[in-house]
Amino acid sequence: MRIALVVNSRQDDSEFQVEYEPAHTIDLIRHGIEATGHEYVFVEANETFVETLRRVKPDLVFNRAEGLRGESRESHVPAMLEMLSIPYVGSNVLTTAIGLDKTWTKKAVAYHGIKTAAFYLCSSLKDAEPIKDGHPYILKPNEEGSSMGINEDNVVPNSAALKKKLKSMLGQYHEPILIEQFIAGREFSIGLLGRPRQEPEVLPILEIDFSKFPEAKGVFGQRAKTVLDSLEHYICPAKIPAALKTRLERISLDVWHCLNVKDFARMDYRMNSKGEIFFLEINPLPGMDFDTERNDLSFFPFMAMKGGYTYDQLIRRLLESACSRYGLKL
């Protein structure tokens, strides 16, 4: 079987390239695909990738493309693959579109009874006028991933600070801004790994230990993930009671099903001092970086390694999950 890895390659270290795949991750995925004994093909997800796919004729695509532009950019490659009848690893057009839009994700999970923090979507300063109480709030670009545009100064204590930050972010990101009630407390990340004809496997839960880097002020944003980053900040498996572990797993499985997720995803939660769990967001195309020399590790493969997987085994499991859905033999 010919398996094509379709990605957007990282060209620099700018904020707007942070979601794209660095060379070491591409090499790791290539090695994992080749370890299955199948043929590997690389395809850059640029404006000509459809022509490239028609030329190389893959039997399966390992989709890692974040998209080039637009509010639904993570859905572009899945849409083209479906149009060409090419099977692929990962969630479909609608799930990736919803997952990239923080507000639509929150609406979808709230409809299914999953608790999420109060929120507003603002495309202008006027849209923020109804926000009179409920502070503090945190502001996030609505259609970005990898904590783009999010740092500790995004938490605002009052209306004046909110409007000032909103004006700045609208000018910088040129997209709607999610204004979400800030939940002070513990933060957890949960990875789910699909498996044939079964419920997805919940990987070891990861907790972010904010006590190790107080300068982040309880915000796991871009600065926390880069400048302040250290493996010492993450507890995996999280040291939590069995009942809390079960609750987080059950909520994550509910999110998986209500958003029709396929093969893999990572979900983030906050828990306040009362023990209430709030869904934050989902990444149906979770990072796959695992460069131990540069301490550049994405949560999803990190959790998988804590669950006993090698990187090659993780790639095989993802391929098995997708192949099972399409009736392919790996």
Image: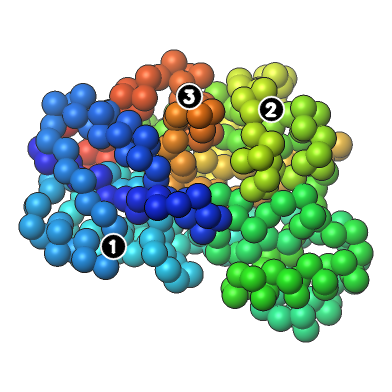
Calculate the distance from the C-alpha at mark 2 to the C-alpha at mark 1. 36 Å
Judging depth in this view, the residue of 307 and 50 nearest the camera is 50
Task: Give the crowd class for mark 2: few <14, some 14-19, many >=20 residues within 10 Å.
Answer: some
Judging depth in this view, the residue of 134 and 248 nearest the camera is 134
For label 2, the SS is helix
Amino acid at pointer 2: His
Amino acid at pointer 3: Glu
The image position of residue 53, as x and y in percent, is 15, 57
For label 3, the SS is loop
Which is more N-terminal, label 3 or label 2?
2
Calculate the distance from the C-alpha at mark 2 to the C-alpha at mark 3. 17 Å
For label 1, the SS is loop
Write down the residue under mark 1.
46
Residue lying farthest to the top in this orientation: 308
Residue at the location (13% across, 46% down)? 59
Residue 36 visible to the viewer: yes
Q: Quadrant of the C terminus?
A: top left
**Is 256 rendered above or below residue 167?**
above
Q: Nearer the viewer, mark 1 or mark 3?
A: 3
**Is 330 rendered above or below residue 42?**
above
